[in-house]
Image: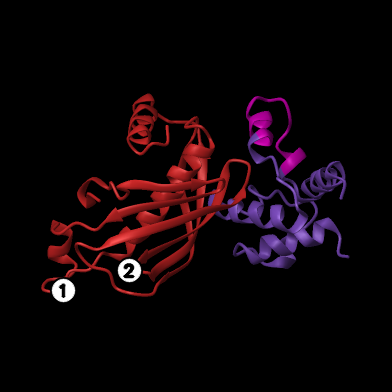
Chain colours: A purple, B red
Amino acid sequence: MASSFDRIADIIAENSEVPRDKILPDSHVINDLGIDSLDFLDIVFAIDKAFGIKVPVEAWTQEVNAGNAPAEQYFVMKNLAARIDELVAAKGG
Amino acid sequence: MRLEYFQMIDRVASLDGEAIVVESTIPDASPVFEGHFPGYPLMPGVLLVETMAQASGWLLLKLMNFERMPFLMGVKEAKFRSFVGPSTPVTVHAKRIHDGSGYAVTQARIEANGKRICDAELTLRIMDFPAPELAAAMRGRGQELGLA
């Protein structure tokens, strides 16, 4: 099976105007790829469905806004893929 | 249904887990029909979308115990299959197909006389109430609808 990074990058390319080859492990989803909030919702919905999880975007955003976590921890592609892997593992998948 | 006040839902017919059925009647007359269209009044497609969004919204409000507010953010696969005009009773079905973090996705459809009028998949962003007046208004209307 493709890596989580590749699956997420495919999903982003399908749900935005970002070309697949521009999506790199160090890309920041918002700052580098320019994903807007509505496209991001579509992307999260597609990730939720593809991985059978519920990406806790609200909790992540609250942590970042409160200064308790750097945005890069959740919104840089390689880290996002790691967080998704953790969620899948926690679910028992 | 009071088009000028965006009050699209008259009553709740049933609420079953993740699905709601609501009923409403398109008004006999409205300024909306003077423009859409002269001599051939039709319920505008955008207001049919609003009706499906409101049915979805009431479902989500109930599922969240009126603690947060759903706002329409996306409409996908909207299809308008048949015209519907003044004085027509309609039934609106909506069900939550995904409960995400800060958003929900519903599928909704409107039927009249047993015939499908339209359907769509709707994405609603879930937010804290931005104003206490809105929270109070939603709870008040929810009580009238038997939801709150």
Horizontal side of A64 relative to B90 (left or right) equals right
User: Which chain letter goes with mark 1?
Assistant: B
| Residue A81 location (% of width, % of height) | 80, 50
Q: Main secondary structure of the magenta part?
A: helix
Q: Nearer the viewer, residue A19 or B129?
A: B129
| B2 shown above or below B66 | below
Query: Looking at the rendering, which quadrant does residue A17 occupy?
Result: bottom right
Residue depth check, mark 1 versus mark 2: number of the one nearer the observer: 2
| Residue at x 42%, y 32% (from the top left corner) | B148
| Residue B41 location (% of width, % of height) | 17, 69
Cα distance between the residues tagged 1 and 2: 20 Å
| B106 shown above or below B111 | above
Query: Looking at the rendering, which quadrant does residue B141 occupy?
Result: top left
**Residue that badge 2 annotates:** B113
Going by the numbered disc 2, the residue's amino acid type is Asn
Q: Name the secondary structure under disc 2.
A: loop
Q: Earlier in the sequence, mark 1 or mark 2?
A: 1
Going by the numbered disc 1, the residue's amino acid type is Tyr
| Residue A37 location (% of width, % of height) | 55, 48
| Residue at x 47%, y 63% (from the top left corner) | B120
Q: How packed is label 2: few (under 14 Cα within 10 Å), some, or many (20 or more)? A: few
Is residue A35 at least partly visible in the picture?
no
Is residue A74 at least partly visible in the picture?
yes
Q: Nearer the viewer, residue B24 or A13?
A: B24
Q: How packed is label 1: few (under 14 Cα within 10 Å), some, or many (20 or more)? A: few
Q: Nearer the viewer, residue B6 or B11?
A: B11
Kindly identify which numbered label has been placed on residue B106. Answer: none
Q: Name the secondary structure under disc 1.
A: loop
Per the image, is A20 magenta? no
| A65 shown above or below A23 | above
Where are the magenta residues, as a range? A59-74
Kindly identify which numbered label has been placed on residue B40. Answer: 1
